[in-house]
Image: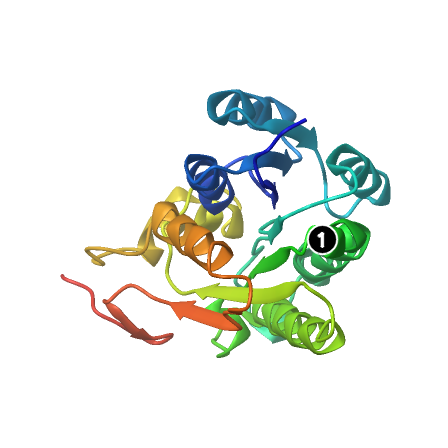
Amino acid sequence: MTTRPVAVVTGASSGIGAATARDLGRAGFEVVCAARRLDRVEALAKEIDGRAVRCDVTSAEDVAALTAAVGDRLDLLVNNAGGAFGFEPVAEADLGAWRRMYEVNVIGVAAVTKSLLPALVAGRGTIVVMGSTAGQVAYEGGGGYVAAKHAVKAVVDTLRLELFDQPVRVCEIAPGMVRSEGFALTRFDGDEAKAEAVYAGVAEPLTSQDVAEIVTWVATRPPHVNIDRLTVRPRAQAAQHKVHRVQ
Protein backbone atom coordinates (compact mmCIF):
# COMPACT_ATOMS: atom_id res chain seq x y z
CA MET A 1 0.00 0.00 0.00
CA THR A 2 1.39 3.37 -1.01
CA THR A 3 1.36 6.31 1.38
CA ARG A 4 2.03 8.76 -1.43
CA PRO A 5 -0.84 10.74 -2.94
CA VAL A 6 -1.85 9.25 -6.28
CA ALA A 7 -2.06 11.24 -9.51
CA VAL A 8 -3.21 10.20 -12.98
CA VAL A 9 -1.72 12.05 -15.95
CA THR A 10 -3.21 11.33 -19.37
CA GLY A 11 -1.17 11.94 -22.49
CA ALA A 12 1.94 11.27 -20.41
CA SER A 13 4.10 9.84 -23.18
CA SER A 14 5.65 13.17 -24.24
CA GLY A 15 5.59 16.96 -23.96
CA ILE A 16 3.61 18.58 -21.17
CA GLY A 17 2.24 15.25 -19.97
CA ALA A 18 5.65 13.64 -19.48
CA ALA A 19 7.07 16.78 -17.85
CA THR A 20 4.06 16.94 -15.52
CA ALA A 21 4.45 13.31 -14.49
CA ARG A 22 8.11 13.91 -13.66
CA ASP A 23 7.40 17.09 -11.71
CA LEU A 24 4.60 15.47 -9.72
CA GLY A 25 6.89 12.54 -8.99
CA ARG A 26 9.48 14.93 -7.58
CA ALA A 27 6.72 16.51 -5.47
CA GLY A 28 5.97 13.17 -3.83
CA PHE A 29 3.09 11.81 -5.91
CA GLU A 30 2.78 8.25 -7.14
CA VAL A 31 1.98 8.96 -10.77
CA VAL A 32 -0.10 6.71 -12.98
CA CYS A 33 1.27 7.54 -16.43
CA ALA A 34 -1.43 6.94 -19.04
CA ALA A 35 -0.98 7.20 -22.81
CA ARG A 36 -1.41 5.27 -26.03
CA ARG A 37 2.35 4.63 -26.41
CA LEU A 38 2.89 2.02 -23.71
CA ASP A 39 6.64 1.68 -24.27
CA ARG A 40 7.13 5.38 -23.51
CA VAL A 41 5.02 5.48 -20.36
CA GLU A 42 6.58 2.26 -19.07
CA ALA A 43 10.02 3.86 -19.33
CA LEU A 44 8.73 7.05 -17.70
CA ALA A 45 7.00 5.16 -14.87
CA LYS A 46 10.20 3.25 -14.15
CA GLU A 47 12.15 6.52 -14.06
CA ILE A 48 9.82 8.19 -11.54
CA ASP A 49 8.76 5.11 -9.54
CA GLY A 50 5.22 5.34 -10.85
CA ARG A 51 2.87 3.09 -12.78
CA ALA A 52 2.13 2.82 -16.50
CA VAL A 53 -1.24 2.17 -18.14
CA ARG A 54 -1.91 2.09 -21.84
CA CYS A 55 -4.90 4.38 -22.39
CA ASP A 56 -6.42 5.94 -25.47
CA VAL A 57 -8.90 8.36 -23.90
CA THR A 58 -11.28 7.87 -26.83
CA SER A 59 -11.58 4.14 -26.03
CA ALA A 60 -14.22 3.14 -23.47
CA GLU A 61 -12.35 -0.11 -22.79
CA ASP A 62 -9.07 1.70 -22.14
CA VAL A 63 -10.71 4.22 -19.83
CA ALA A 64 -12.35 1.40 -17.87
CA ALA A 65 -8.99 -0.35 -17.55
CA LEU A 66 -7.37 2.87 -16.31
CA THR A 67 -10.10 3.26 -13.71
CA ALA A 68 -9.64 -0.32 -12.54
CA ALA A 69 -5.89 0.23 -12.23
CA VAL A 70 -6.38 3.36 -10.11
CA GLY A 71 -8.70 1.77 -7.57
CA ASP A 72 -11.05 3.40 -5.08
CA ARG A 73 -9.19 6.62 -4.21
CA LEU A 74 -7.48 9.26 -6.31
CA ASP A 75 -5.90 12.54 -5.25
CA LEU A 76 -5.28 14.19 -8.61
CA LEU A 77 -6.41 13.80 -12.21
CA VAL A 78 -4.52 15.73 -14.89
CA ASN A 79 -6.56 15.62 -18.10
CA ASN A 80 -3.70 16.42 -20.45
CA ALA A 81 -4.34 14.20 -23.49
CA GLY A 82 -5.27 16.28 -26.51
CA GLY A 83 -3.91 17.75 -29.70
CA ALA A 84 -4.41 19.89 -32.78
CA PHE A 85 -4.70 18.44 -36.28
CA GLY A 86 -4.48 20.74 -39.28
CA PHE A 87 -4.47 24.48 -39.86
CA GLU A 88 -6.99 24.99 -42.65
CA PRO A 89 -9.63 27.74 -42.79
CA VAL A 90 -13.16 26.66 -41.94
CA ALA A 91 -14.12 26.81 -45.64
CA GLU A 92 -11.56 24.05 -46.32
CA ALA A 93 -12.03 22.13 -43.07
CA ASP A 94 -11.00 18.50 -42.84
CA LEU A 95 -14.08 17.36 -40.93
CA GLY A 96 -12.45 14.07 -40.03
CA ALA A 97 -9.69 15.98 -38.25
CA TRP A 98 -12.31 18.13 -36.51
CA ARG A 99 -14.01 14.97 -35.22
CA ARG A 100 -10.67 13.59 -33.99
CA MET A 101 -9.94 16.83 -32.15
CA TYR A 102 -13.37 16.87 -30.52
CA GLU A 103 -13.08 13.21 -29.52
CA VAL A 104 -9.67 13.47 -27.86
CA ASN A 105 -9.87 17.01 -26.43
CA VAL A 106 -13.50 17.05 -25.26
CA ILE A 107 -15.07 13.59 -25.15
CA GLY A 108 -11.83 12.15 -23.79
CA VAL A 109 -11.79 14.64 -20.92
CA ALA A 110 -15.43 13.92 -20.14
CA ALA A 111 -14.98 10.14 -20.32
CA VAL A 112 -11.93 9.98 -18.05
CA THR A 113 -13.38 12.45 -15.56
CA LYS A 114 -16.72 10.63 -15.40
CA SER A 115 -15.04 7.27 -14.86
CA LEU A 116 -12.61 8.47 -12.17
CA LEU A 117 -14.96 10.84 -10.36
CA PRO A 118 -16.02 8.40 -7.61
CA ALA A 119 -12.35 7.82 -6.74
CA LEU A 120 -11.70 11.58 -6.79
CA VAL A 121 -14.62 12.22 -4.43
CA ALA A 122 -13.35 9.50 -2.10
CA GLY A 123 -9.87 11.02 -2.20
CA ARG A 124 -11.06 14.63 -1.87
CA GLY A 125 -9.15 15.13 -5.07
CA THR A 126 -8.36 17.74 -7.69
CA ILE A 127 -9.18 17.75 -11.40
CA VAL A 128 -6.79 19.72 -13.60
CA VAL A 129 -7.72 20.10 -17.26
CA MET A 130 -5.18 21.26 -19.81
CA GLY A 131 -6.98 23.89 -21.83
CA SER A 132 -5.47 26.52 -24.10
CA THR A 133 -5.62 30.20 -24.92
CA ALA A 134 -7.31 28.83 -28.06
CA GLY A 135 -10.27 28.22 -25.75
CA GLN A 136 -10.46 31.96 -25.06
CA VAL A 137 -9.67 33.68 -28.38
CA ALA A 138 -10.24 32.51 -31.95
CA TYR A 139 -7.60 32.75 -34.65
CA GLU A 140 -7.48 32.09 -38.39
CA GLY A 141 -6.74 28.51 -39.31
CA GLY A 142 -7.51 27.24 -35.85
CA GLY A 143 -11.23 26.57 -36.29
CA GLY A 144 -11.42 22.94 -35.21
CA TYR A 145 -8.92 23.26 -32.37
CA VAL A 146 -10.39 26.58 -31.21
CA ALA A 147 -13.88 25.03 -31.16
CA ALA A 148 -12.64 22.00 -29.21
CA LYS A 149 -10.78 24.05 -26.61
CA HIS A 150 -13.75 26.41 -26.18
CA ALA A 151 -15.77 23.26 -25.47
CA VAL A 152 -13.16 22.13 -22.93
CA LYS A 153 -13.54 25.44 -21.13
CA ALA A 154 -17.30 24.95 -21.04
CA VAL A 155 -16.92 21.42 -19.64
CA VAL A 156 -14.63 22.70 -16.86
CA ASP A 157 -16.96 25.52 -15.88
CA THR A 158 -20.02 23.25 -15.93
CA LEU A 159 -18.27 20.56 -13.89
CA ARG A 160 -17.23 23.08 -11.24
CA LEU A 161 -20.84 24.21 -10.86
CA GLU A 162 -22.11 20.66 -10.64
CA LEU A 163 -19.52 19.63 -8.03
CA PHE A 164 -19.90 22.72 -5.84
CA ASP A 165 -20.99 20.61 -2.84
CA GLN A 166 -18.38 17.87 -3.33
CA PRO A 167 -14.81 17.83 -1.92
CA VAL A 168 -13.31 18.05 -5.43
CA ARG A 169 -11.50 21.03 -6.95
CA VAL A 170 -11.84 21.74 -10.68
CA CYS A 171 -9.11 23.77 -12.37
CA GLU A 172 -8.12 24.68 -15.92
CA ILE A 173 -4.64 25.64 -17.06
CA ALA A 174 -4.68 27.53 -20.37
CA PRO A 175 -1.21 27.84 -21.91
CA GLY A 176 -0.35 30.05 -24.83
CA MET A 177 2.72 29.34 -26.99
CA VAL A 178 4.48 26.25 -25.66
CA ARG A 179 7.33 24.62 -27.53
CA SER A 180 6.39 21.12 -26.46
CA GLU A 181 7.52 17.90 -28.02
CA GLY A 182 5.53 17.08 -31.15
CA PHE A 183 2.59 19.50 -30.81
CA ALA A 184 3.28 21.64 -33.89
CA LEU A 185 4.73 18.71 -35.80
CA THR A 186 1.51 16.75 -35.27
CA ARG A 187 -0.59 19.74 -36.25
CA PHE A 188 1.24 20.09 -39.56
CA ASP A 189 1.29 16.36 -40.27
CA GLY A 190 5.04 15.99 -39.84
CA ASP A 191 6.05 19.06 -41.87
CA GLU A 192 9.12 20.21 -39.93
CA ALA A 193 9.44 23.53 -41.75
CA LYS A 194 5.88 24.56 -40.89
CA ALA A 195 6.29 23.37 -37.32
CA GLU A 196 9.49 25.38 -36.86
CA ALA A 197 7.89 28.49 -38.36
CA VAL A 198 5.46 28.63 -35.42
CA TYR A 199 8.34 29.49 -33.09
CA ALA A 200 10.57 31.38 -35.54
CA GLY A 201 12.20 34.38 -33.92
CA VAL A 202 10.61 33.79 -30.51
CA ALA A 203 13.53 33.71 -28.11
CA GLU A 204 11.74 32.07 -25.20
CA PRO A 205 8.43 30.33 -25.78
CA LEU A 206 7.09 28.41 -22.80
CA THR A 207 8.50 24.94 -22.20
CA SER A 208 6.73 21.80 -21.10
CA GLN A 209 8.53 22.11 -17.76
CA ASP A 210 7.10 25.61 -17.24
CA VAL A 211 3.58 24.24 -17.55
CA ALA A 212 4.38 21.14 -15.47
CA GLU A 213 5.51 23.27 -12.54
CA ILE A 214 2.24 25.22 -12.73
CA VAL A 215 0.24 21.97 -12.60
CA THR A 216 2.11 20.92 -9.48
CA TRP A 217 1.61 24.34 -7.88
CA VAL A 218 -2.15 24.28 -8.57
CA ALA A 219 -2.45 20.73 -7.23
CA THR A 220 -0.58 21.46 -4.02
CA ARG A 221 -2.53 24.52 -2.84
CA PRO A 222 -4.41 24.08 0.46
CA PRO A 223 -7.59 22.03 -0.07
CA HIS A 224 -9.91 25.03 0.31
CA VAL A 225 -8.09 26.97 -2.46
CA ASN A 226 -9.38 26.45 -6.00
CA ILE A 227 -7.52 27.97 -8.95
CA ASP A 228 -10.46 28.22 -11.32
CA ARG A 229 -8.43 29.09 -14.42
CA LEU A 230 -4.79 30.02 -14.90
CA THR A 231 -3.75 31.53 -18.25
CA VAL A 232 -0.03 31.45 -18.93
CA ARG A 233 1.88 32.82 -21.91
CA PRO A 234 5.53 33.53 -22.64
CA ARG A 235 6.47 37.15 -22.09
CA ALA A 236 6.94 37.50 -25.87
CA GLN A 237 3.27 36.67 -26.51
CA ALA A 238 1.17 39.61 -25.37
CA ALA A 239 -1.92 38.17 -27.05
CA GLN A 240 -2.84 35.41 -29.48
CA HIS A 241 -1.95 37.61 -32.46
CA LYS A 242 0.80 39.76 -30.90
CA VAL A 243 4.09 37.89 -30.61
CA HIS A 244 7.52 39.50 -30.46
CA ARG A 245 9.80 37.87 -33.02
CA VAL A 246 13.44 38.77 -33.56
CA GLN A 247 14.30 38.83 -37.26
Tell me the crowding category of disc 1: few under 14, some 14 to 19, or many 20 or more residues within 10 angstroms, Cα based.
many
Q: Hey, which quadrant is residue 59 in on the image?
A: top right
Residue at which label 1 appears? 120
Q: Position of residue 82 (x, y in %)?
A: 60, 52
Q: Hey, which quadrant is residue 232 in on the image?
A: bottom left
Tell me how many marks there are.
1
Its colouring scheme is: rainbow
Which residue appears at 70% of the width and 57% of the height? 109
- In the displayed orientation, state which residue is furthest to the left: 247
Q: Is residue 229 above or below residue 34?
A: below
Left or right for 132, reference 158 = left
Amino acid type of the residue that numbered disc 1 sits on in the rendered structure: Leu
In this view of the protein, which residue sits in the foreground, 102 or 25? Answer: 25
Quadrant assignment for the N terminus: top right
In this view of the protein, which residue sits in the foreground, 118 or 41? Answer: 118
Quadrant assignment for the C terminus: bottom left
